[in-house]
């Protein structure tokens, strides 16, 4: 089961394939949508909720309880085999795309969006698209891998459950393993009893 972390307002709604060009493997020309998935909860969380946290500079790894309560995990099942261009395979990044890990992990998405467009355009001799998306190294949970799924493959996946983040079976393990503090807001001391 693949996992996608989303806001609770999307509960029971179709999966959203973004095409605004603001994410790592989005279409550079905004002409197709992309859905980001993790193979496990830690990778899905690290690539979504915690993707801007600077782990090397800030040791205060915390999340507000209100933020936890505003999130859900979409358990996504695969109905048909997904054909993914595997950027984690030996020789693919450097040998085929001419890129290094730094370029793939950069916060400047120029190179990764170009890779997305190249993979999206690849066709077999029969004119059929070769790939449904990209399997890429997780920048925030390396050496795990993440999936950028192209919208054209949306019939190959389905949401089987929407699970509140705090109720996810793997949430306590993630909090403990990644040393995340879940903080409550300070009570308003100015109010009289």
Image (spheres, helix red, strand yellow):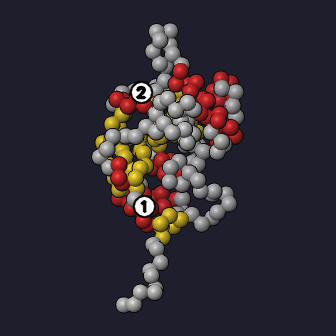
Above or below 69: residue 21: above
Query: Residue 183 bears which disc, if any?
Result: none
Outermost residue, top side: 125
Above or below 41: residue 16: above
Quarter of the image for the C terminus: give it: bottom left
- Please state the horizontal and vertical placement of residue 150, each as a whole percent of the image: 46, 31
Whether the residues at callouts 1 and 2 have beta carbons within 8 Å, the answer is no
Per the image, label 1 sits on a secondary structure element best described as: helix
Q: Nearer the viewer, residue 21 or 63?
A: 21
Please identify the quarter of the rendering in which residue 97 is found: top right
Per the image, label 2 sits on a secondary structure element best described as: helix
- Please state the horizontal and vertical placement of residue 84, each as a whole percent of the image: 49, 28
Above or below 109: residue 191: below
- Residue at the image point whose x is 46% and y is 34% from the top: 33
- Residue at the image point whose x is 36% and y is 34% from the top: 157
- Residue at the image point whose x is 64% and y is 63% from the top: 58
Quarter of the image for the N terminus: give it: top left
Q: Residues within 10 Å of mark 1 (few under 14, many from 20)?
A: some
- Please state the horizontal and vertical placement of residue 137, each as a whole percent of the image: 58, 39
Of circles 1 and 2, the one toward us is 2
Q: Residues within 10 Å of mark 2 (few under 14, many from 20)?
A: some
Q: Which residue is mark 1?
A: 68
Q: Earlier in the sequence, mark 1 or mark 2?
A: 1
Q: Whole-Å distance between the Cαs marked 1 and 2?
A: 31 Å
Query: Residue 152 bears which disc, if any?
Result: 2
Q: Nearer the viewer, residue 12 or 32?
A: 32
- Please state the horizontal and vertical placement of residue 37, each as a whole percent of the image: 46, 41
């Amino acid at each position: 089961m693949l996992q996608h972390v989303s806001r609770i307002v999307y509960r029971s709604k179709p999966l959203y394939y973004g095409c605004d060009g603001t994410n790592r493997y989005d279409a550079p020309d905004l002409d197709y949508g992309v859905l980001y998935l993790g193979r496990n909860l830690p990778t899905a969380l690290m690539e979504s909720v915690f993707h801007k946290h600077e782990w090397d500079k800030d040791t205060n790894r915390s999340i507000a309880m209100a933020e936890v309560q505003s999130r859900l995990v979409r358990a996504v099942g695969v109905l048909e085999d997904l054909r993914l261009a595997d950027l984690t395979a030996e020789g693919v990044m450097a040998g085929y795309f001419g890129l290094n890990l730094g370029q793939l992990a950069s916060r400047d998405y120029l190179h990764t969006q170009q890779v997305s467009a190249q993979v999206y355009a690849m066709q077999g001799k029969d004119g059929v698209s070769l790939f449904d998306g990209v399997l890429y190294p997780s920048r925030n949970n390396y050496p795990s891998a993440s999936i950028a799924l192209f919208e054209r493959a949306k019939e190959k996946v389905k949401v089987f459950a929407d699970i509140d983040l705090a109720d996810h079976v793997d949430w306590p393990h993630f909090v403990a393993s990644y040393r995340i503090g879940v903080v409550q807001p300070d009570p308003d001391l100015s109010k009289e009893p």
